[in-house]
Image (tube, rainbow, N blue to C red):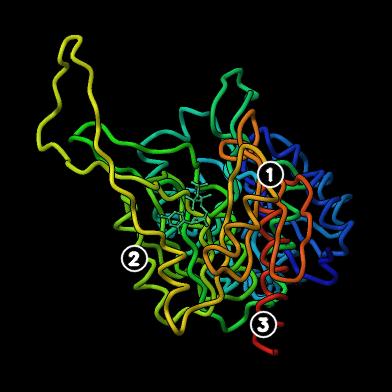
């Protein structure tokens, strides 16, 4: 991983997580990035500009009205200089100002004046993060293509527990490195399915599964970062669309996912089936809530859903097909069986159950194809997705060359 000579403008806004940004400057510089720090006025109440100046080796700017600094490198010049802008920590206040296009200090002015991709790493109290105003601002920024890095959940400086913790320095450094991508899927159309499917029983109940969608979303993001034009077909999850993903189609049932994937895959080069598609659906969906039948029990008649990957591989012309296999046991055998049985080009298998797989932050994959295999050891899902995409790109190119 290298960020050699990459020009990263780090915006630091007012929040206690600013202390983690000191570490971030060091981690970015470890990869030889050229880092310039701009602080908001509130950030200076937490840390001194001198701290960031010492760590970045560059003078730190705070005010738009600093005549001396403007003479050295004007703010428009600084906006043009940046290849990436990363705001970490991004407070609720700066997210609101960015969402509304304000330019009332140097940092927000730079964000408006720069064509560089903007990434934000929110950090705030969990209640502020959950507030409808913050949710709306995040949605606006997301739709505008701003990259959302985190937040994570856990213990907070204020004593609360919940979502709103800034990601760690190394995670933000990795996201910056990944944001420059390796171009291995440049020019290709890639469809990714992700998340669970829900099969309705009645208006309030359904048959679902424990897929969180996070691995599939990470795969979609990694494909976009590798230069692909990505369509993400998502089951019912409440995850934000990853930065760079061109199109998202939300579906609920396996039948809807089947239609959406087949439609989106008509012109695709690669289809990656990361969704945990329900195998069965109730024969009959009650229009009214089923009532308890005191002691009488209940049997549901289920029919099998069509297999999306098999439908695609049966077509005379189809995309390069990558499946996933989540297994509780005998992972390698089941995965290789699915590779052959479903007519796939590759399959990525993992063990699920007991803290592994669906709800975990990290994962490990065993990847198989007709004449090869690779183990991708346990790593955070975004990093694992990046490695998987590199492998898919290699196998795809080899298959098209042969
Ligand atoms: N899959 C699919 N369509 C389905 C079911 C599964 O395309 N109706 C895809 C999944 O997206 C995944 C792969 O098939 O890429 C394997 O899914 P999995 O649920 O592990 O396998 P199944 O074929 O359902 O087999 P089993 O449930 O018996 O393990």
Say which quarter of the image contains residue 352. Answer: top right
Q: Residue at x 72, y 53 (%)?
A: 366
Say which quarter of the image contains residue 285. Answer: top left
Q: Earlier in the sequence, mark 1 or mark 3?
A: 1
Left or right: 357 in relation to 402: left
Secondary structure under the numbered disc 2 in the rendered image: helix
Q: Position of residue 188 (x, y in %)?
A: 56, 81
In this rendering, the answer to whether 402 lies above or below 6 is below
What is the CA distance from the residue labelled 2 to the residue labelled 3?
Answer: 26 Å
Quarter of the figure with the C terminus = bottom right
Most distant residue in the top direction:
295
Closer to us: 1 or 109: 1
**Residue for badge 3:** 399
Closer to us: 275 or 183: 275
Q: Earlier in the sequence, mark 1 or mark 2?
A: 2
Mark 1 and mark 2 in contact? Answer it, CB < 8 Å: no
Mark closer to the observer (2, 3)? 3
Say which quarter of the image contains residue 51. Answer: top right
Q: Earlier in the sequence, mark 2 or mark 3?
A: 2
Q: Report whether the residue tagged 3 is closer than 8 Å to ligand 1.
A: no
Q: Which mark is residue 260?
A: 2
């Amino acid at each position: 991983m290298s960020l050699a000579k990459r020009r990263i403008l780090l915006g630091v806004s007012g929040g206690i997580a600013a202390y983690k940004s000191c570490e971030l400057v060091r981690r970015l510089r470890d990869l030889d990035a050229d880092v310039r720090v701009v602080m908001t006025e509130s950030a200076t109440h937490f840390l001194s500009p001198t701290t960031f100046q010492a760590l970045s080796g560059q003078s730190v700017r705070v005010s738009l009205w600093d005549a001396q600094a403007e003479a050295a490198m004007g703010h428009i010049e600084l906006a043009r200089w940046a290849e990436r802008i990363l705001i970490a920590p991004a407070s609720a206040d700066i997210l609101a100002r960015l969402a509304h296009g304000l330019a009332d200090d140097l940092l927000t002015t730079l964000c408006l004046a720069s064509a560089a991709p903007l990434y934000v790493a929110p950090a705030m109290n969990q209640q502020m993060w959950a507030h409808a105003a913050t949710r709306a601002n995040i949605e606006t920024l997301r739709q505008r293509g701003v990259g959302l890095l985190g937040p994570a959940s856990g213990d907070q400086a204020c004593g609360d527990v919940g979502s709103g913790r800034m990601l760690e320095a190394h995670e933000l450094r990795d996201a910056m490195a990944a944001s420059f991508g390796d171009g291995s899927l440049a020019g290709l159309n890639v469809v990714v399915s992700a998340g669970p499917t829900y099969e309705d029983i009645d208006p309030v109940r359904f048959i679902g599964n424990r897929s969180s969608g996070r691995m599939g979303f990470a795969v979609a993001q990694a494909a976009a970062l590798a230069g692909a034009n990505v369509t993400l077909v998502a089951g019912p999850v409440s995850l934000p669309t990853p930065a760079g993903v061109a199109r998202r189609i939300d579906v609920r049932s396996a039948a809807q996912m089947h239609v959406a994937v087949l439609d989106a895959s008509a012109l695709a080069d690669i289809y990656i089936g990361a969704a945990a598609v329900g195998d069965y659906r109730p024969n009959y969906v009650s229009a009214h809530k089923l009532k308890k039948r005191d002691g009488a029990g209940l049997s549901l008649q289920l029919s099998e859903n069509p297999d999306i990957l098999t439908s695609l591989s049966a077509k005379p012309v189809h995309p390069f097909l990558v499946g996933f296999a989540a297994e509780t046991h005998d992972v390698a055998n089941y995965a290789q069986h699915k590779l052959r049985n479903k007519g796939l080009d590759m399959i990525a298998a993992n063990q699920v159950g007991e803290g592994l797989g669906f709800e975990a932050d990290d994962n490990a994959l065993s990847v198989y194809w007709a004449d090869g295999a690779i183990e991708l050891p346990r790593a955070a899902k975004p990093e694992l997705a990046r490695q998987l995409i590199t492998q898919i790109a290699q196998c795809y190119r080899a298959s098209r060359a042969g």
